Amino acid sequence: MLMNRTGKKRDAPSASKRVRAEAALPKSEERFQDVCEKSGLAYFFIDMEGRFQGVNKAWLRLHKLDTADEILGRHYSTTQVEADQAAARQIVERLPTQKGITQGEFRRRCKDGSIGWHAFSVSPVRRAGKVIGIEGILIDTTERKRAEERLQEGEAKLRALFEGSVYAMGLAKDGIQIMVNPAYVELFGYSNASEVVGRPLFTNIAPEERPRLREFTRRRSLGEPVPSLYETRGVKRDGTVFEMAVGVSTYELNNEVYTIGILRDITQRKMAEKKVREQAALLDNANDAICVTALDGTILYWNRGSERTFGWTGAEMVNRKATELIRQDLVSMAAISAVLFNQGTWSGEWRHTTKGGGVVEVFSRLTLMRNEQGEAQSIFAISTDITEKKQIEAQFLRAQRLESIGALASGIAHDLNNVLTPILLGVPLLDAMVKDEKARHLLGTIQSSAQRGAGMVKQVLTFARGVEGDRLPLQLRHLVGEMTRFAAETFPKDIRVESDVAVDALPILGDATQLHQALLNLCINARDAMPGGGVLTLKAANVVLSEEEAEKIPGAQPGSFASLSVADTGAGIPPEIEAKIFEPFFTTKGQGKGTGLGLSTVLGIVHGHGGFVRHASKVGHGSTFELCIPATTTEQAAAKGASAAPWPRAHGECILVVDDEAAIGEVARQALVEYGYQVITASRGAEALSIFEERRQGIQLVLTDMMMPEMDGPTLVAALRAVDRGVRIVGITGMSDTAGVNTMKALELSAMLRKPFTIERLLAVIRGALPVTPGSEGPAGSGPPSP
């Protein structure tokens, strides 16, 4: 606070002095005076005539004055030695035209005649754009000057060290900088050392770092152990903050302790470290397992992806050899190392053991890292977990094998169906003609055998490729209820049968017989897995499959599905055979206890319904098999259920029968004639087309095989439609795969007959394809007419 002549606060100066002071003192006086008092800085204010108009207590103490009255109103030169007055006058004269702060150092003459040194910082004070005076602060540098004198003997060596050092160096005493080298000046962006010398020690330290460093200084002064090398942030003259490393040491000279600091800009290093940390974070966040090993196998780096893949943490792996924890094929490792050291890289698939004892398959890319001299120094490895991918590939391979078997079975089935069809058509005709009971009994045996053969063919096709039978609306609760009752009544009493059907379970369009067979196969497997008893649970629910989930299931599409599941509490499926359970003829049951077609049949039935199978198993805890079949809406189910085929009635319509199998054509002709139809036969497509062109007005329907030599069924259909767009055509096919049947459907036929078929089925399909005439409708539930 500015003082008056008596040394008291100038609360009420004389009017003339108050007016002069109020006109001269800058507005900044009130802001600075308290700061200056607390900091111990000597503050003064002079008017444009160079006369003191205000000083603080620190200024009075610096000049050894008792009261402000001793100096107020006097010229500033009275406090200076004669040698410095000219220089001071030049500064005062130039100062009004300059901007910023002017600094320097002068000698002062104290009241008692002693001479001291001080550093000053002065600047003009403006009001309304006009300079009204000069204010400044003084820092006593007398002790520094004396120290300089005491240090003159070693100054040359110290200055040589300072001047020649590539590092910024500063010397301080009592918290004040007394010497800095050119590297220091350059580091902090000053023009010369004088801008720094005399300033507080921490002037160029970021404000938030100063408390920590002051604490270091305090502890060092007490002899406590403190870091001699630390990192902090420096502040350049223009305010730029940068990273800085500081080395501090102290020494004693003439009973006075000095602090010397060596400073270095480490901004680039810190940026590099930050980049390394960021890269390390990226490596840690990578899904792949990334590690670096020494040439002897010692792990140097282990990212989080490695932790997720192999189970061991970085703390467990770093500085240990991989072979100590991860069991590997040493022969394969030797071969890989040979390639790696010869070519510099290696990539391939291999298997590892995880911390939990499991096996993980990875695709690894190894790179040999070399130093600047080209010498091998480490191995960089990136490994991608492909376990799930390999499992999906195995599923696709199994699906392909089943497809191949299905193609073979379909071809065989076509030929067998051609053989069985005449038998199934002819036996009923012979039965009506033969009166001998023994002969009729023999015909019954033949018919039964033929039907059994047809069932066997259908069974093989079902597990191999899926067969699309008649699709009717089905409620899951009925299927689950029937199978639950069957299992409860026939399975051993130590097996408890439970069921759980969701109230909102959606209906499906399906073949009840096939789905019943699929559930039965699963229940029998569950029973056999619980020889000592257990719980068998059948469930029905709704399932929504996302796109992500569908991608992991071969052939699956996203959407809504009805789910039928069978769960047991039995032995479970060992992991080593889990991949084979759907393969045809694979079984773990004893001799004569299983055919190996159970699960294959289930898979074929579900695929035939456009669905998929999921399973889960744990050894000792049981297995669950879930059949997911596309759900339908209640309205769609009702519409499907409303349709019913009329019973066959013959009215003399003319049918053109086309089949390259003479036996089928002849037996079909006789059957149709027996039931009142007129029949024309042809064994080739070209022959049939010629007959139709001549007699198309009298032919009401064409019954043709789809697979014939020369001109096949689809070609014949196109040719017939070219002659008569409205011709009714019923196709006969021995194909059983869904894709082939859908291709036939694209021909827009009136109906499709699958071989082998019975007379009843033949008559029903033909009557359904012919136009309804008066009197053709039979009573509901009536069978075919007698011949």
Image: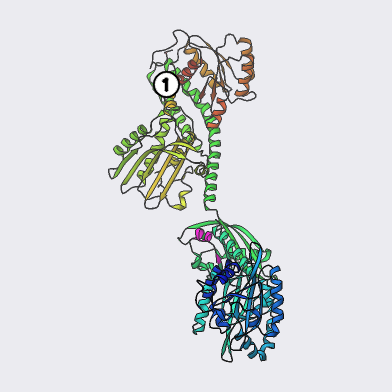
Position of 203 relative to 115 (above/below): above
Q: Quadrant of residue 747?
A: top right
Frontmost residue, 214 versus 39: 39
How far across and down, in percent of the image, does residue 663 sit? 54, 21
| Residue 226 visible | no
Q: Residue at x 30, y 47 (%)?
A: 533
Is residue 715 magenta-colored? Answer: no
How far across and down, in percent of the image, does residue 71 sit? 59, 80
Direction left: furthest residue: 493
Q: Residues within 10 Å of mark 1 (few under 14, many from 20)?
A: few
Which type of secondary structure does the marked residue at label 1 adopt? helix
Position of 341 relative to 506 (above/below): below
Frontmost residue, 153 versus 484: 153
Residue 412 relative to residue 124: left or right: left
Position of 90 relative to 744 (above/below): below
Residue 604 relative to residue 131: left or right: left
Q: Quadrant of residue 119?
A: bottom right
How far across and down, in percent of the image, does residue 120 sit? 63, 77
Frontmost residue, 166 versus 641: 166
Residue 360 relative to residue 710: left or right: left
Direction top: furthest residue: 774
Q: Residue at x 43, y 52 (%)?
A: 574
Q: Quadrant of residue 143?
A: bottom right
Frontmost residue, 715 versus 431: 715
| Residue 579 visible | yes
Numbered range of the magenta stretch: 301-312
Please state which amino acid type lies under the numbered disc 1: Ala
Is residue 311 magenta-colored? Answer: yes
Residue at the disc numbered 1: 642
